[in-house]
Amino acid sequence: MITTLKHPRMQAAIAELKGMIEREYPNVQFRVYRGEDPVAVYIDVLTPVDNTLEIGRLISERELQMHLDEGLEVYVVPGYAPPHNGEREQVRDRRAAR
C-alpha cells in the first residue's frame, strides 16, 4: 500500500481526485496531508455550500478503485465551511442561477 505524499502515483491520484471535484465545485479549498488513523493520505475538501454528500458521491467509486486496484491509501474528507459575509451573496446568486 502506498501512503507517502511524495510518491508519483500518489501525486497523480491526488491531482485526479482534486480535478474531479474542482470541475463540479470550483469554489472548494483543499488541504492534503498524511494522517495516522489509519495511515494514509487525506484530502480535506472545504466547500462554502453544504454539498458534502454530493462530493462524496462524485468521487466514491474512483476512490475505492484507487484503494482496491491500485494500492493507494487516499481518503477524501468533504466538509462544510460557511462562506464569509461577502461570499454568501455570491453563493446565493449561484444557487439562484441553477
Image: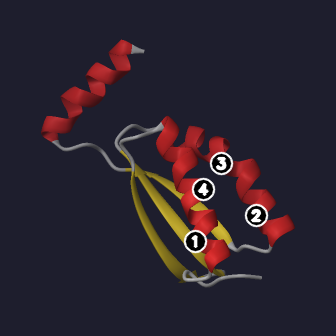
Q: CA distance from mark 3 to mark 2?
A: 11 Å
Q: Which type of secondary structure does the marked residue at label 4 adopt? A: helix
Kind of residue at disc 3: Ile
Left or right: residue 67 compared with residue 79: right
**Which circle's residue, 1 or 2, is located before the other in the chain?**
1
User: Residue beneath label 2, please?
Assistant: 66
Kind of residue at disc 1: Gln
Which quadrant of the structure image shows residue 69? bottom right
Give the numbered dot on residue 11.
Answer: 1
Q: Quadrant of the N terminus?
A: bottom right
Q: Nearer the viewer, mark 1 or mark 2?
A: 1
Q: Nearer the viewer, mark 3 or mark 4?
A: 4
Q: CA distance from mark 1 to mark 2?
A: 12 Å
Query: Which of the two residues, 96 or 11, is positioned nearer the viewer here?
Result: 11
Give the numbered dot on residue 16.
Answer: 4
Q: CA distance from mark 3 to mark 1?
A: 16 Å
Q: Which color scheme did the rendering employ for the protein?
A: secondary structure
User: Residue beneath label 3, please?
Assistant: 59
Kind of residue at disc 4: Glu
Q: Residue at x 63, y 73 (%)?
A: 10
Q: Name the residue furthest front.
A: 8
Q: Residue at x 65, y 69 (%)?
A: 74
Q: Name the residue furthest right.
A: 69
Task: Please say if 13 is above or below 25.
Answer: below
- Badge 3 density bin: few <14, some 14–19, many ≥20, Cα 10 Å: some
Q: Which type of secondary structure does the marked residue at label 3 adopt? A: helix
Kind of residue at disc 2: Met
**Which circle's residue, 3 or 2, is located before the other in the chain?**
3
